[in-house]
Amino acid sequence: MSGALPGTGTGRRVWNVTRGLLLLCFGVFFALPMLALLDFSTKVPGTEERTGEAWSQLLRDPAMTDAITTSLLLAGLTVVGMLVLLVPTMVWVRLRVPRASRLVEFLCLLPLTIPALVIVVGIKNVYAWVNYLIGDSALTLTFLYVVLVLPYAYRALDSALSSIDTTTLAEAARSLGASWFTVIVRVVLPNIWPGVVNAAFISVALVLGEFTVASLLNYDTLPVVIVLLGKSDAPLSMAAALGSIIFAALLLLVMSVLDRRRSTRR
Amino acid sequence: MGPAIGLVPFLAFIGVFLLVPTVTVAVGAFQDESGAFSTEKVSALFEETALRALRQSLLLSTFSAALGAVLGAVLAYLILAAPPSSLVRRLATAVCGVLAQFGGVTLAFAWIATLGFGGLLTDLLADLFGLDATGSGWLYELPGLVLVYTYFQIPLMVIVFLPALEGLRPQWREAAVGLGANTWQYWTKVAVPLLRPAFLGSALLLFANAFAAYATAAALVSQGAPITPLLIRSALSSEIILGQANFAYALALQMVVVVAVVMGLYAWLLRRTSRWLG
């Protein structure tokens, strides 16, 4: 499609130049703030000199390392929680209760309509119980993060499940004497692995950047500490901000490359 | 009951961590501090402070959604010219995914590093043109918020609008050209009418996204509450003093209602789109 359809030679050339220029403008607009972060995190205030001090602080400052550990743990726990909650439910719905599929889809997509901010405002009583039963740890954020990643994880898993014949696979396994646990973990799961990987990557990226819930519940995750330190040690904050977004970008890029491998193999 | 019992863990989890908070907000908005029925908090939504924040929020969402939708549609069209499996396309979608969803804190800091005091562009403009780009601190007010929000709205538009653009079949253009249409006629009579529902739907999604966003604004504006999400923050943090918890409920309810209406319209437009472009 696009402007590449039959046209005169000059028209085509004008379009190509325009396209290049426009792409350049967008590129500058998106790259500039990231370059500014790099610039800010490496400069010695008041001089022209450069330093890697802020970047090496990332792994030495105790508040920062704690926050990074917390955020990575939360990301891992959220992925596990999301899979444990969603995979058996979605497989079960397909096999045994197909009439509930609209309900499950609706509930999974609901967090797109109920903003995280609203959930936090109303969560006080629930978290009083969570803290009473499990203890007061930043890791309890996992519960809310599973809710926040539901829509994205659901879509990834749903498209993977739609691409295989779940019913036949499950019936075959059941008729050979497999338990439901075996069906889900050893038969269905390996077949929807690409969807699982997609869901996991998106969840990790979302959790690492999540600020709203963590900051309003006063837990020190990476984004919260970045904002806290922004006032006392701006270069360190800037380095952490840039480092985390690059990490998330690499995750998503790896995911899309894995996706391509699969689609070319097919 | 039967097999439906397998859904209990899922339903219980969603019930506790999604539905209970939502119901708490909806009920709490109509209660006073002692828990009795009262419309006091909801009527406080129509007083000066809340109305001003709402107006600013709506302006911010409208401007950033309009800018994001138009520029994002253009960018999506430019990206589409590259073949689907090319590295450019992969890279562009991955970067868009990160910028649209990774989160506001990094983006707020990025713009502070760009246009804040001692920022990259601030210094550059001062050196080149003697301009004072930080000026009156506009970056931390509505114009600055629109700029920073647009920075994540454009990538979101690319993600949601690209599939619709991809659905535009080359055959339709060939058919139009074969019937004697020129490029202008093809765009105005065929492509634009086909894409309009998808475009409007995506713009609505952007609006809801901006209206509910919190992180960017919170990281950028540390004091004061120019927009509704930040007013919710101050209501939450001052609840001990003034019994403002229920006011936070009322504000949160207002936010759900606005977002739900917008998302409802979005779903309706999406259904109209999928008739043609799917």
Image (spheres, coloured by chain):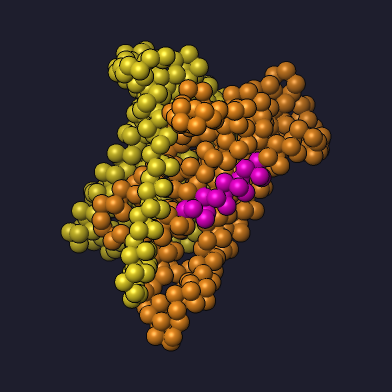
Residue A249 is situated, as x and y percent measured from the top left of the image, at: 33, 39
Residue located 57% across and 44% down the image = B210
Q: Is residue B210 visible?
A: yes
Residue stretch rendered in magenta on the structure: B57-72
What colour denotes chain A? yellow
Vertical comparison of B54 with B218: above or below: below
Q: Is residue B40 left or right of residue A12?
A: right
- In the displayed structure, would residue A85 be above or below residue B244? below
Residue at image point 52% right, 61% down: B199
Report the number of numbered marks: 0
Question: Looking at the image, which is closer to me, A85 or A15?
Answer: A15
Residue B84, picture quadrant: bottom left
Tell me: residue A153, above or below residue A250.
Answer: below
- Colour assignment, chain B: orange
Please name whichever residue, A139 or A214, is drawn nearer the observer in this view of the structure: A214
Asked whether A84 falls inside the magenta stretch, the response is no
Measured as percent of width and height from the top left, residue B85 is found at 26, 58
Does residue A187 appear to the left or right of B103 in the view shown? left
Q: Is residue B72 left or right of residue B242?
A: left
Q: In the image, is residue A53 above or below residue A193?
A: above
Give the residue drawn at x 66%, y 45%: B58
Regarding residue A103, the answer to whether it shows in the image is no
**Of residues A148 and B38, the one drawn nearer to the viewer in this rendering:** A148
Q: Nearer the viewer, residue B233 or A226?
A: A226
* Residue B37 as seen in the image, left or right of residue A164: right
Please say whether residue B69 is one of the residues in the magenta stretch: yes
Quarter of the picture containing the C terminus of chain B is bottom left
Q: Main secondary structure of the magenta part?
A: helix
Q: Where residue B196 sits: x, y (%)?
A: 54, 66
